Amino acid sequence: MPRPELSVVIPCKNEDHHLEDCVLSVVDWADEVVIADSGSTDRTLEIAARLCERFPTRCRLVQREFINFGSFKSWASQQCRHDWVFVLDADERMSKSLSHEIDTVLSSSSAADAYLVRFRHYFLGHRIRFGKWNGRGVIRLFRQSRCHYDSREVHEKVIVPSGRVRKLHSRLDHFTCTSLDRWFQKKYAYARYGANELAKRGRRARAYDLFLRPLIQFIAGYIFRLGFLDGIPGLIVAFDGAFSTYLKYVKLWEIQQNQKSSPIQQNPQILPDSKKQAA
């Protein structure tokens, strides 16, 4: 049984340093590559247009305003022509072993509705083998007729009503940080979205969240998840996890303060002078 047709969707914004390599890792394998841009101001659109011209039958560009991650990825996946969709971030690369495994599992008559994918993470060129980044994986391959994204602002999830989810063994290459300048910009953006999501759920920032929660994140990643075995990069990644947690709850605390404070409405009444009034 041949593999069913499959679309790869690449959500992106200001990814001119990643986009071309990302597309080239899938364009000869996928039946369709959809570049979904959310308002790039660098050379991303120029590169996307060049790739679409180079691969006119397989590659196309769609654009829409970014609201949040859940909303945008939901919309982007719906632009795909095929039922099977693989969501590939611009800083990721499809590996040969993973594409071959996907061909195999989708060719089976007993294919699930969605598949979890794990990653080979790289931080400034260093492979991160341990720590909290190496979890059980996330759903990246799914049938859009049977699955959908939730509406979370960040760390969005694919909802699979049937519960038929399996795990792929091969890994996706993830070049998570190639520049500290871009990395810190990303951290602040994710902290803002994460804080907004917590605020929508009625969560409040407490002293525990600002002090103990980041500390626990560091200990869990660096000690219990063996992040120390990755050397200095592992130490940096563990600190990054703690700082990201701290930053998110600081932003949540800021939201709380803004909700508490309101502009002072001054409506001074000029009282007439009593002598003039008497006159």
Image: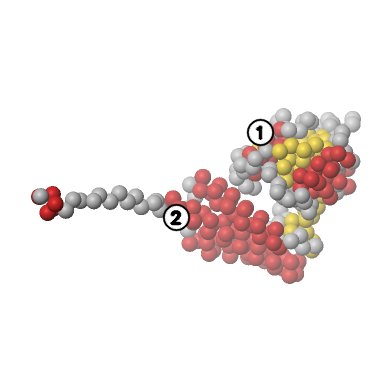
Can you identify the residue that label 2 sits on?
A: 257
Examine the image and state in which quarter residue 151 appears: top right
User: Mark 1 against mark 2, which lies toward the viewer?
Assistant: 2
Q: Is residue 178 left or right of residue 25?
A: left
Q: Residue at coordinates 83% horizontally, 35% vertically from top-left?
A: 32
Residue 38 showing in the rendered view: yes
Q: Give the residue pinned by disc 1.
A: 161
Q: Residues within 10 Å of mark 2 (few under 14, many from 20)?
A: few
- Which mark, by number, is residue 173? none
Instruction: Locate residue 184, reporting x and y percent.
Output: 66, 60
Label 1 neighbourhood size at 10 Å, few (<14), some (14-19), many (20+)?
A: few
> Quarter of the image containing the N terminus?
top right
Position of 150 compared to 173: left or right? left
N-term-proximal mark, 1 vs 2: 1
Q: Position of residue 182 (x, y in %)?
A: 70, 58
What x and y, as percent, mark residue 81?
78, 30
